[in-house]
Image: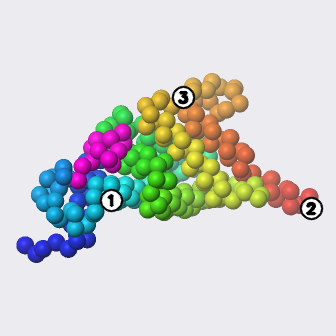
Amino acid sequence: MPRRSADETRTLILEAAIHLLLERGVTAGVQHVRLQEVLRSVGLTTGAAYRIWADQDDFHRDLAVAMVGVRFAPPVTSAMIAIQDILAANGPLVEVVRAAALDQVTYSSKFHLEPESRDSHAFITALALRTAAGAWPELRAASAVRHRESIDAFAALYGALLQRYERRMREPMTIVDFTEAMAALGEGFAIRAAEGLNHPMYDVPDGADIPSGEWTLFGISILGMIEGFTVPLEDSTRETSRT
């Protein structure tokens, strides 16, 4: 068998360490994934690891950076699956919001409800590590990369939805501003889910100011954000004609 390169050995060890971290959950933290344990799981000796990392702290820093970069699917995959039938049926924007918000809340809650859900565990674990990103410059940089990837992907999705439902951003706000606000809100609720807090749910009756039916607090918040950040295209046309 050909000898592994240092990069191949590093990848092998980090993949095994990430697997352990996801098995144990975010509360364990990278500090509880011991290098010796990981080495035993892949059949390597201490010498192989210490040619790559100077000590445990060096290994944990690299593990945190690697974990923040883990994605099992593109950022918008779950949301797109949740709304695809509504879009195919030309359903209203309010139903798109309801379904997408419920999907996000359910996705975050899977961390507790479905221990085998690797996507949810990866998302919550990476989010928890990002909240501590100030501790290591390398982790801060990896967190920024992940955040930008998510913002770019969701900005494209939200932009397409606004175009489809004939709305535009209120000046001087941009689609990126809207996406940043949505990310902050969604990640805040995800942290609550990681803490084991139930997401507020509402059964809105007919005749209320909010469309009737079952709503998440996240979904209701999104309705308010759409109202605050955007206007119908017909309103902008009307404003232009007045000037």
Q: Nearer the viewer, mark 1 or mark 2?
A: 1
> Magenta includes 230?
no
- Mark toward the start of the polypeptide (1 vs 2): 1
Decide which of 218, 162 is in the foreground and name it: 218
Q: What's the residue at 44%, 54% (across, down)?
A: 77
Decide which of 91, 197 is in the foreground and name it: 197
Residue, disc 3:
201
Image quarter of the C terminus: bottom right
Q: What's the residue at 43%, 31% (across, down)?
A: 196
- Coloured how? rainbow
Are the residues flagged by discs 2 and 3 in contact, CB closer than 8 Å? no
Residue, disc 1:
58
Are the residues flagged by discs 1 and 2 in contact, CB closer than 8 Å? no
Give the secondary structure at mark 3.
strand
Categorize mark 3 by other alpha carbons within 10 Å: few (<14), some (14-19), many (20+): some
Residue, disc 2:
243
Q: Residue furthest left?
A: 1
Q: Nearer the viewer, mark 2 or mark 3?
A: 3
